Amino acid sequence: MEKEKWWKKSVVYQIYPRSFCDSNGDGIGDINGIRSKLWYLGELGVDVLWLSPVYPSPNADNGYDISDYYGVSPEYGTMEDMEAFIHECKNRGIKIMMDLVVNHTSDEHPWFMEAKKSKDNPYRDYYIWRKGEAGSPPNQMESCFGGSAWEYSEETGEYYLHFYHKKQPDLNWENEAMRKEIWKMMNYWIGMGVGGFRMDVIDVIGKVPDQEIKENGPKLHEYLQEMNRETFGGKGLVTVGECWGADVEDGILYSAPERKELDMIFQFEQMQADQAPGKRKWDLKPLALKQLKQAFAKWQEALEGKGWNSLFWNSHDLPRIVSRWGNDKEYRVESAKMLATTLHGMKGTPYIYQGEEIGMTNYPFSGIGDFADIESVNMYHERKQMGCREEEIMESLCAKARDNARTPMQWDSSHAAGFTEGTPWYKVNPNFTEINAKKALEDKNSIFYYYKKLISLRKEEPVLAHGRFHLLCPEDERVFAYTREQDGRKWLVVCNFYREPAGFAYAAKGKVILSNYKQEPVMQMEGMELRPYEAMICEVIEAKEEQKP
Ligand code: NOJ
């Protein structure tokens, strides 16, 4: 059963269209730009593309504020371009996973424009309205981008709810007519030939604002089952739910096949290993490797045979992993490959974010004027007002700002890294002459080809797609090691997370499948000393008694 699902052997590549490739010189990436790079994605070997939103949008949150679910923003092209893109992907065996942003719309969506006009407007109840309490918001709920989650609307003297920007009013999922509109829209895109949906902050659609319940509301799973029935169920698509507030029990509810909801969950527990406990992402602490290992192991074990997880380090919401937990200076290549090994050795569906496969790094920001993202700009002003020091705020922003991931893709060493012939909408990382796709393709030892190998291994080796995970040396503060086992075969994945050498012992011989340093084909694994950021995948052979598979 488990083996039947095609996406269990797939690797998803996320495209942030604005920054991927510009075909018409306006400085903004577009659909024809993506089409022109399909050969590159084919070379890498990915078979699903998650397309961040390309719908018409006022861009308060770079497309995550949609004003028309049925269209394509003129910035990105036309519907004909989109059709051609879907068609070409189909010919290449690549599926398109559309971003489904249905927790909220733009405030410029016709539904909201109607809804705000009057209390008896037919669209009023598509959104969430409340009276204020003596001139202030109905309650203390906060927006993820800072400030109150309630915005006063002059026309009717009531507040509407927005968990994100005030230009992103939350939809009211209690309203059946609204839900039907969403099903209709999803079926439209299915009819267009898309291969799946990535569901933006889907864990909050069941909110109960009056009880201040945000994630995992009581009707959430009912809505998802209805969605499955009314739209993609039984059609062989792939669906993934973005959930910031999920624990393993929730993960099973979302992704257990018999519950007929989603195929997999996209949760962030592992990404909190460098965040001060109980604080926000901006509150930094050094990476705690033990915590990271525990987070991964917990999900690997809990979902075994029950549900399915996504594996990722990066997205358009996260800083670049090689800068975050690798070494983006002298060990950039080694550490990028090490991080890839750690992640792609596990069970789940891996996601690669554009540029990760060539080891793109964080941007060297020098002041608040360098940031474009609303989240960062709001955080800066909020913390300034609270009296935080400029250097401290900048340190957090440099480490965690989403803009780190949103700089243009580095294609070659020509003007604007080959991203556009015009002026790019956002800064190009000055290291593009060194780090770019053209160079990576010319070097058989590049990060790119290492990712390519990992992607093909997942397709070819059932032990990688389906083998059972077991964490080794959980107390070790420097080495992340685990095994994968299936049908009498056992693979060992060993990764040194630091620049200092580290010891590791396993009483067996290993046949090297992949590694980021030169190795003998067969290794004795007792008392190994791992070099800086060294990583390997080995098939365990000749295990001593106590460590036989
Ligand atoms: C999650 C998206 O990934 C992020 O970019 C966006 O700001 C919020 N959801 C709101 O849509």
Image: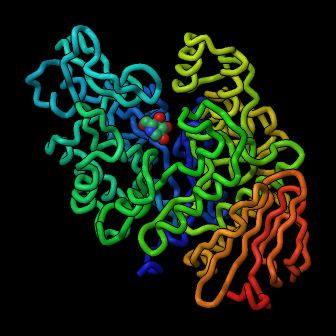
Q: Residue at x 28, y 17 (%)?
A: 137
What residue is drawn where x is 40% and y is 59%? 249
Residue plotted at (81% across, 68% down): 515
Identified at 37% across, 31% down, the residue is: 163
The residue at the far left in this view is: 120
Q: In the rendered image, which quarter is residue 419 located in?
A: top right
On screen, residue 128 versus residue 533, left or right, reads left
Closest to the observer, 225 or 216:
216
Q: Is residue 319 above or below residue 366?
A: below
Give the image quarter of residue 453. Answer: bottom right
Taking depth in this image into account, of 459 and 472 the one nearest to the observer is 472
Residue 258 sits in quarter: bottom left
Foreground pick, 402 / 342: 342
- Relative to residue 473, is residue 346 drawn left or right? left
Q: Position of residue 220 (x, y in %)?
A: 27, 50
With respect to residue 426, does 255 lie above or below? below
**The N terminus appears in which quarter of the rendering?**
bottom left
Residue 378 visible here: yes
**If the image is split into quadrants, where does the C terminus sit?**
bottom right
Q: Is residue 196 visible?
A: no
Q: Position of residue 193 (x, y in %)?
A: 37, 60
Above-or-below relation of 475 to 5: above
